[in-house]
Amino acid sequence: MRFYIAKDLDKLKKSALLYGLIPLFISIPPVIIGVLEHFSFPDLDKKTSDEILPVMLEKHTSDWFAALVMTGVLAAFMSTLDSQLLALGTIVTRDFVLPFKKKMGLQEQVKIGRIFVIVFALVGLAIAAQPFDAIDDMGKMAFRGLAVLFPVTLAILR
């Protein structure tokens, strides 16, 4: 969402184009880790393969480095989740509540946004209580949802 703050249309177009390339570069390290995992642990089962980063760090690096990397991963994960919750609360408040209640002050918008943040956090907690068997299953579910939304998104953008 941050690339929408561009100062002019040309910079917005450039950032939107580059934003499409970012997933390509982000997906390279997990693939490399997965290939290295296959060489280090050829008979690893599906469930344990979701924990491959700490297992690989434990086997191939020192304890302090593994702890440092996993702390950074946890911090990045928490930061991303925090931003997603805040963005979802804002989106629901501004796009779904505000159009129906036009005379809403900023304090009331913040209050409703906080309520939705709590609701989405509880939904996430419910999902965490009954987790997927593997991250692969969660990825498949996400891509099925994106596939279902694609025609609608395409129709809206026309």
Image (cartoon, rainbow, N blue to C red):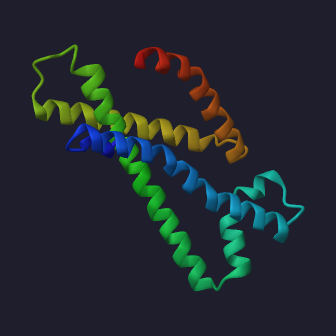
Name the image quarter holding residue 64. bottom right
Name the image quarter holding residue 28. bottom right
Instruction: Tell me the residue at 50%/16% (across/down).
Output: 152
Please state if 135 lies on the left or on the right of 129 as rendered.
right
Residue lying at the far right in this picture: please name it: 43
Instruction: Tell me the residue at 50%/71% (across/down).
Output: 71
Please state if 144 lies on the left or on the right of 12 as rendered.
right
Please state if 50 lies on the left or on the right of 82 as rendered.
right
Q: Is residue 51 visible?
A: no
Q: Position of residue 149 (x, y in %)?
A: 53, 22
Image quarter hosting the N terminus: top left
Q: Position of residue 50 (x, y in %)?
A: 70, 55
- Nearer the observer, 19 or 114: 19
In this view, 9 is above or below 33: above
Image quarter hosting the C terminus: top left
In this view, 134 is above or below 119: below
Instruction: Tell me the residue at 56%/77% (across/down).
Output: 67
In this view, 61 is above or below 125: below
Q: Position of residue 61 (x, y in %)?
A: 67, 82
